Image (tube, rainbow, N blue to C red):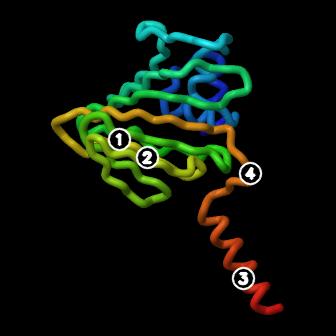
Amino acid sequence: MSRSMLSAVERGEKAPSVLILDQIATGLGTSLARLLAWESEGRVIVLRSDEQDRAIDPSGWERRILSPVLANVEFEFMRTTLRPGVNAGNFLPHNPGSREYVAVERGILRLTLDGKAFLLKKGDSIYYAGDCLHEFENPDSRNSCEYYLAMDVTGHPEQLRHRITVQKKKSSRGKHNAA
């Protein structure tokens, strides 16, 4: 995102899309929910349907934030609806060690992670490391897709992506074999 776009959003001159809001949140190492809501306190927090923050994108999708924003917690639980044929776009990688879980409630979801597509249908779920490019698309031209996404964007450096760990293991094996 350009500096001029970010500045225009900050000044209220431009209304950002959900994708732009997510890019801002990712750049700040936080969640979209934290940008939209104040922190809540309490041992029990009920979010009534009409109190839940919604991010509605003009391209045809809606994200409803189901989790409260808590101090020192970078967790977000949301429900997303993609209208028929809608592609929500590419989301930037989150912090290394971040995690995401998706469960499809209705319809078909094409989830693309670092260029590899996974086709998920009603009842399917998937876990993936959140520090990758990820794209959500409803390939069905007639029916909406609804899915739940839980994400922990806190990140834990000791839990770097699997492929990085594999590369390190391979290089350390070579060192052990050479010794």
Q: Residue at x 59, y 12 (%)?
A: 44
Looking at the rendered structure, the kind of residue marked 3 is: Arg
Quadrant where the N terminus sits is: top right
Looking at the rendered structure, the kind of residue marked 4 is: Pro
- Which of discs 2 and 4 lies nearer the camera? The answer is 4
Q: CA distance from mark 4 to mark 1?
A: 31 Å
Name the side, left or right, on which 179 lies relative to 47. right
Tell me whether circle 3 and circle 4 mark residues in contact (CB < 8 Å): no
Rendering quarter of residue 35? top right
Q: Position of residue 68 (x, y in %)?
A: 58, 18
Q: Residue at x 53, y 22 (%)?
A: 67
Q: Residue at x 78, y 85 (%)?
A: 176
Please give the label number shown on residue 135.
2
Judged from the image, the secondary structure of the residue bearing numbered disc 4 is helix
Looking at the rendered structure, the kind of residue marked 1 is: Asn
Question: In the picture shown, does residue 117 fall above or below 154?
Answer: below
Badge 4 is on which residue? 157
Please give the label number shown on residue 87.
1
Please give the label number shown on residue 173.
3
Q: Position of residue 130 (x, y in %)?
A: 57, 47
Judged from the image, the secondary structure of the residue bearing numbered disc 2 is strand
